[in-house]
């Protein structure tokens, strides 16, 4: 276990995992080893193995605070990833009701659909977090003006819908993206 910890500190993740594997073969009831190996699997990007290790640690020791926190955070992360995958390539509106050419173009292009969904979500967030009702109305008015301009300019020579949407998203989120 000590050597696994040393390998972990030296960023030798595979060696650390191998040592935790050995320790767990000798004593599978080590909740700390399961949790530590789960953290390594998570850093390595193997979420399924990480969640299994966190779950094993919690099962062995229901009061293991770190394992419970790791299990909960990874579960929420997996849930968020699943939700994002479910809406990937889908815009914020129902494509079956799309009438305008710009809406049909957004529905036909997964990149544009993702941008549309991000713009709407970011607008909702900024309006909700506005300091006062007047600022919230101004933010919503800016979004309404963008949509009206987008609808009017789409199809005109030189109009780049993706560029306009990216610029709008950056305007909403700011330079730092939040």
Image (cartoon, grey):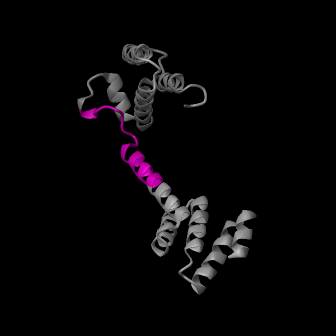
Which image quarter: residue 152?
top left
**Magenta portion: prevailing SS class:** helix
- Give the farthest residue toward the front: 63
Query: Residue 58: where, in percent of width, then height?
Result: 48, 69
State the residue at coordinates (74%, 69%): 6
Provide residue 45's location: percent of width, then percent of height.
57, 59
Give the magenta part as a residue range: 76-96
- For the N terminus, the image quarter is bottom right
Instruction: Left or right? Give the position of 147 relative to 50.
Output: left
Front-most of residues 125 and 113: 125
Point 41% across, 38% down: residue: 110
Query: The C terminus is located in which quarter?
Result: top right
**Front in this rendered view, residue 172 or 126:** 126
Residue 146: image quadrant is top left
Q: Is residue 160 above or below residue 15?
A: above
In magenta segment, residue 108: no
């Amino acid at each position: 276990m000590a050597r696994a910890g040393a390998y972990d500190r030296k960023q030798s993740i595979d060696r650390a995992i191998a040592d935790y594997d050995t320790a767990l073969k000798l004593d599978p009831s080590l909740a700390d080893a399961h949790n530590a190996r789960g953290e390594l699997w998570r850093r390595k990007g193997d979420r399924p193995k990480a969640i299994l290790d966190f779950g094993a640690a919690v099962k062995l020791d229901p009061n293991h605070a770190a394992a419970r926190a790791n299990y909960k955070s990874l579960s929420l992360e997996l849930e968020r990833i699943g939700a994002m995958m479910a809406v990937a390539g889908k815009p914020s509106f129902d494509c079956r009701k799309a009438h305008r050419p710009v809406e049909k173009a957004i529905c036909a292009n997964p990149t544009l659909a993702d941008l549309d969904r991000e713009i709407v979500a970011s607008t909702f967030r900024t309006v909700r977090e506005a300091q006062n009702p007047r600022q919230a109305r101004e933010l919503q008015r800016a979004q309404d003006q963008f949509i009206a301009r987008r609808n009017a300019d789409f199809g005109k020579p030189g109009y780049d819908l993706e560029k306009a949407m990216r610029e709008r998203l950056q305007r909403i989120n700011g330079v730092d993206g939040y």
